[in-house]
Image (cartoon, rainbow, N blue to C red):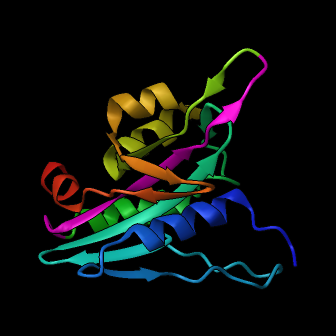
């Protein structure tokens, strides 16, 4: 059995962290290497009266590249358009900067929700989003680590009010 990549583990941990009273749907990725499906996002959440559209990204680096291979332009555009259909739609990126061990120190993991308006500005003007900037323009997502996997406390009510 192939080893699961860290991005898929982050998606699984996030999905498993969503409370039972919140509708959560994971949009399936394309399994065809020749024709990729162009999904708007990874997850659709609903907790009345809010619809929440999320694209999840995970990296072991201190920044997430805005390269088209990583952050797709169509996702930025479609999430931005969806957000502006209703004040009850929240859209954005959930960025997971994974921790790692360096020779001289341990870098702790950090996870942030970046509202689509902020992500669009970064995408249009920068080559990457450093975690210090994510901290400044986003909302930190608390988590707990259970041996090897994580549980996230995604603050739906807080994010809905701020976005």
Residue 160 in percent (x, y) is at 18, 58
Residue 117: give x, y in percent of width and height. Answer: 32, 47
Q: How many marks?
A: 0
Could you tell me which residue is drawn at 41 percent across and 64 percent down?
54
Q: In the image, is residue 133 part of the stretch drawn in magenta?
A: no
Main SS of the magenta part reads strand
Whether residue 32 is situated above or below residue 5 in the rendered picture:
below
- Residue visible at 47% across and 65% down? 14
Q: Which quadrant of the structure image shows residue 100? A: top right
Q: With respect to residue 92, does 122 lie above or below? A: above
Q: Magenta includes 90?
A: yes
Q: Nearer the viewer, residue 77 or 156?
A: 156
Identified at 32% across, 58% down, the residue is: 154
For residue 7, side relative to residue 131 (left or right)? right
Q: Quadrant of residue 33?
A: bottom right
**Picture quarter with the N terminus:** bottom right
Give the x, y percent position of residue 76. Answer: 46, 57
Q: Position of residue 17 (x, y in %)?
A: 40, 67
Whether residue 68 is situated above or below residue 31 in the rendered picture: above
Q: Residue furthest top?
A: 104
Instruction: Kindly identify the residue that appears in the image at 51 percent across and 81 percent down.
Output: 27
Say whether residue 130 is left or right of residue 163. right
Q: Considering depth in this image, is 50 or 142 the residue closer to the camera?
A: 142
The residue at the far right in this view is 1
**Is residue 123 shown left or right of residue 60?**
left
Q: In the rendered view, does 67 fall on the left or right side of 153?
A: right
The residue range painted magenta reads 86-103
Spot the residue most to the front. Answer: 147
């Amino acid at each position: 059995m192939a080893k699961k990549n860290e991005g898929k583990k982050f998606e699984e941990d996030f999905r498993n962290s969503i409370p039972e009273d919140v509708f959560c749907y994971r949009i399936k990725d394309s399994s065809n290497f020749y024709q990729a499906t162009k999904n708007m996002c990874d997850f659709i959440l609903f907790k009345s009266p809010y619809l929440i559209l999320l694209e999840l990204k995970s990296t072991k680096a201190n920044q997430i590249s805005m390269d088209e291979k990583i952050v797709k332009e169509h996702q930025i555009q479609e999430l931005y358009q969806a957000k502006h259909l209703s004040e009850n739609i929240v859209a954005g990126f959930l960025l997971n900067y994974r921790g790692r061990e360096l020779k001289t120190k341990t870098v702790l993991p950090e996870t942030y929700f970046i509202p689509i308006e902020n992500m669009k500005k970064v995408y249009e003007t920068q080559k990457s989003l450093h975690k210090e900037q994510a901290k400044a323009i986003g909302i930190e997502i608390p988590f707990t680590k259970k041996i090897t996997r994580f549980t996230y406390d995604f603050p739906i009510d807080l994010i809905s009010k701020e976005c």
